Image: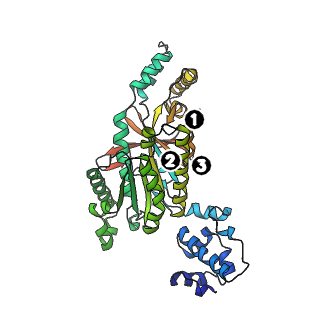
Amino acid sequence: MEIADLPIATSHRANLLAAGYSSLAALSAASPPRLARDLSIEVHEAEEILKVAVGANKSKGADGPSTSSVLKGVQNAWDMLSDEQSRRHINTGSADLNNILGGGIHCKEVTEIVTGLINTSSLIQVVSQESVKLNWGMLYTILNANSDEDFTTKDLTFVRIQLAINVQIPVEYGGLGGKAVYIDTEGSFMVERVYQIAEGCISDILEYFPHCHDKAPAGQEKLKPESFLADIYYFRICSYTEQIAVINYLEKFLGEHKDVRIVIIDSVTFHFRQDFDDMALRTRVLSGLSLKLMKLSKAYNLAVVLLNQVTTKFTEGSFQLTLALVIACSKQSCGVLLVVVHFENHDNAGDSWSHSCTNRLILYWNGNERYGYLDKSPSLPVASAPYAVTVKGVRDAVNSNSKRVRVM
């Protein structure tokens, strides 16, 4: 069988020949990222073409190259660099948050956004008074008195909806022009808020691209709140078994809806915190779900955003370290209690869960200001940036300047 006889789309056959793939042997030796780059297609489409090519080789009894070349884990360094350089980002709504995230929420990666942390201002004020001698009981009281439950629900609401809206910004306006999958485990999805943030997004687009809007009639039709709402696929989950089933079903769903560019799970551990008594089993199940989501994000070129909450874990054995870090932070006037947050706040999914995601962004209060803190990233430095929540959604804070956080 020749390239021209492969049972694939005519356009793909023509592109293969134009790209220099003159034989099945040459095609089978290519890696999925390289083929995707040569044909200007998605990686999962390249994988399907390679599977067909390998099948054609087997059917004619040819001893072609090893099928290991089409395994999803096989890449060379050049393919990886090319893939990273062409990777798209989803705008968070705040330029400062985008800056510390390397351009925004990354496609082909799993990002965890965490809230539920303490407001640090009162503790620093107390620690700064040298006459005050803190003991364990006092520190515990101060930390718990400054936890902000209202912040957790309100800010996560805006962030998750903002991402579901911003991923749909048309390409001609600097967006991805994609769609969103929203998996709601808590029942906190508010359509009215989605409509409000969509209106804010459209308002900003018309303000920043007035001339481009006049010349793009097709884009004008998209710039309606109803269109934004229509491109959010909503799943309501009522148990951990339903959550597992939906995530297992995602691969088929994404294969049928290839324009999806973000999957949001709010929150990923909600049902596992309530219904799971076996902690070891819970850890294994969550790790398996995380690996599956990572696989989907790479295969379908989309971002996976997991929303989660943490609880503050205080142990008297760690009090001396905590107090020393608090005092050091207060004297240096840097990052306030970020170091304490990093060491002393533990994920509700268990300590091992923090290793399951590519990136981790922590949202917290510092006095009356909201901040985002990049706690984990394989390629970006630890940093924090202020942001604001307005009627339009997530935006830059007034007079904001993103800065590098000093980790002690």
Question: Is tag 3's residue or tag 2's residue first in the polypeptide sequence?
Answer: 2
Dot 1: few (<14), some (14–19), or many (≥20) neighbours within 10 Å? few
The type of residue carrying mark 2 is Ile
Name the residue nearer the viewer: 129 or 5: 5
Q: Secondary structure at mark 1?
A: loop
The type of residue carrying mark 3 is Pro
Question: Is tag 1's residue or tag 3's residue first in the polypeptide sequence?
Answer: 3
Q: Secondary structure at mark 2?
A: helix
Say which residue label 3 marks: 378
Q: Report the residue at 46% width, 48% height from top.
A: 306
* 134 shown above or below 99: above
Quadrant occupied by the N terminus: bottom right
* 259 shown above or below 349: below
Task: Residue 60: name its quadrant.
Answer: bottom right
Q: Report the residue at 48% width, 60% height from top.
A: 302
Q: Which mark is residue 407?
A: 1
Task: Residue 79: name its quadrant.
Answer: bottom right
Q: Measure the C-alpha gap from mark 1 to mark 3.
A: 16 Å
Q: Secondary structure at mark 3?
A: loop
Question: Is tag 2's residue or tag 1's residue first in the polypeptide sequence?
Answer: 2
Asked whether residue 401 is in view, the answer is no
Mark 1 or 3: in front is 3
Say which residue label 2 marks: 100
* 268 shown above or below 9: above
Task: Find residue 239 and report its horizontal and vertical position in percent.
Answer: 40, 47
Dot 2: few (<14), some (14–19), or many (≥20) neighbours within 10 Å? many
Q: Report the residue at 62% width, 61% height from top.
A: 81
